[in-house]
Image: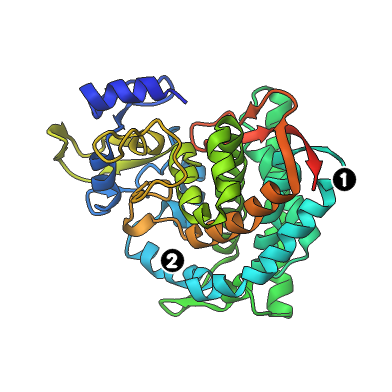
Amino acid sequence: MPLDAFSELRRCAPVAWHPYKDGPGFLALTGYDEILAVSRDSATWSSQTAGVFFDLLGEHEEFQLSLMLLTMDPPRHTQLRALVSKGFTPRRVARLNDHVADMARQIVDNVAERGECDFVNDVAGALPSYVIAELLGIPLEDGRRLYELTEIMNSGAVGDAVQTQVIEAQLQMFQYGTELAERKRANPGDDIATALLNAEVDGERLSDLEFNMFFLLLINAGGDTTRNLVASGILALMEHPAERARLVADPSLLPTAIEEMLRFTTPVTAFVRTATRDSELGGIPVKAGDRAAMFYPSANRDENHFDDPDRFDIGRAPNPHLAFGGGGTHFCLGANLARVEASAIIPEVLARLTDLELAGPVERVRSNLMNGIHSMPVTFTAA
């Protein structure tokens, strides 16, 4: 993560034009206030026009992504978000607490006696895959397989052979979503998949393609954020042993520690918006059609909003980070769930995998979207 470059941009040009070799260029937003302003103004800054990713898409891809909640604008976004948000209400998530805690214990049980593991694959990635499976009403082993498919899809690796694997993983994901819809229509349950299939918007139910795009988003977003938070958060504790010892000595610091992990590691790198009309941002003229990339890791190190922002402080409060977005219509639906999962797995790791340390190089995800870790070998002593 180019934190030094972000710092310089915040100081000199928090709204700066950046040429892009694979597209028309974009405004790089590195200041907290500018990112907050764009996040909360969906009338001026569209998620649907040209999508939220850096690369411009073909007509077919753009149509498919327009059916995904992530790349919708109000009022359609508001209607569909209301459907899926019923599965992520604080009350519903709170009901999962005990079950998530049981799953976290089982995951640590599975690795404790080995003395070593790939922390991302065996621990950080396992819990969200099981929890999302539970919410969708599918077998836990299916959740694990879907997680493996997302790892292939989001690997960021290059080459023709890899691209073939990515396409195959996407096809398998869509096939599973189609079969899931058929099963849930025949045998409905108390789960998000059934709720989506039975819901009506303007008197119509979701098409198979719309359901598949929802399914794809839930599997990806439901796993990536938590996996990145837990893996990067534990890495931050290993790199800051005094803060790790502080948390072990005082578990009551866990809530603020998780918020600091979110701020300090920021699981999502950037999303893009497109201006719908001429305006200005941070004193810089903006033309309709201009694209702006919101770099959340930079906002979370903004000196105007965080004291000593490059210091990892598990007791930091207040901590108004933008790790889940800057509010507005696209604030992360799974924020409460990610916190519940992190609150379950991190204490288990600290209490039962003592002397945790790196056993090899950390392999980061190659992505301009997700700020995550692909592989992190560790050793430990079972307590």
- Nearer-the-camera pick, 38 or 166: 38
Horizontal side, residue 331 vs residue 40: left or right: right
The kind of residue on which mark 1 rests is Glu
**Observer-nearest residue: 271 or 97?**
97
Residue 84 at what x, y percent from top left?
A: 50, 68
Q: How many other residues sit within 10 Å of disc 1, few (<14), some (14-19) or many (≥20)?
A: few
* Residue depicted at x 61% and y 47%: 248
The residue that mark 1 highlights is 113
Front-lying residue, 184 or 36: 36
Q: Say which quarter of the image contains residue 365.
A: top right
Mark 1: secondary structure: loop
Image-based side of 231 in relation to 51, left or right:
right
The residue that disc 2 covers is 81
Binning the other alpha carbons within 10 Å of mark 2 as few (below 14), some (14 to 19) or many (20 upward) gives: some
Query: Pointers 2 and 1 in contact (CB under 8 A)?
Result: no
Residue 300 is situated, as x and y percent measured from the top left of the image, at: 37, 39
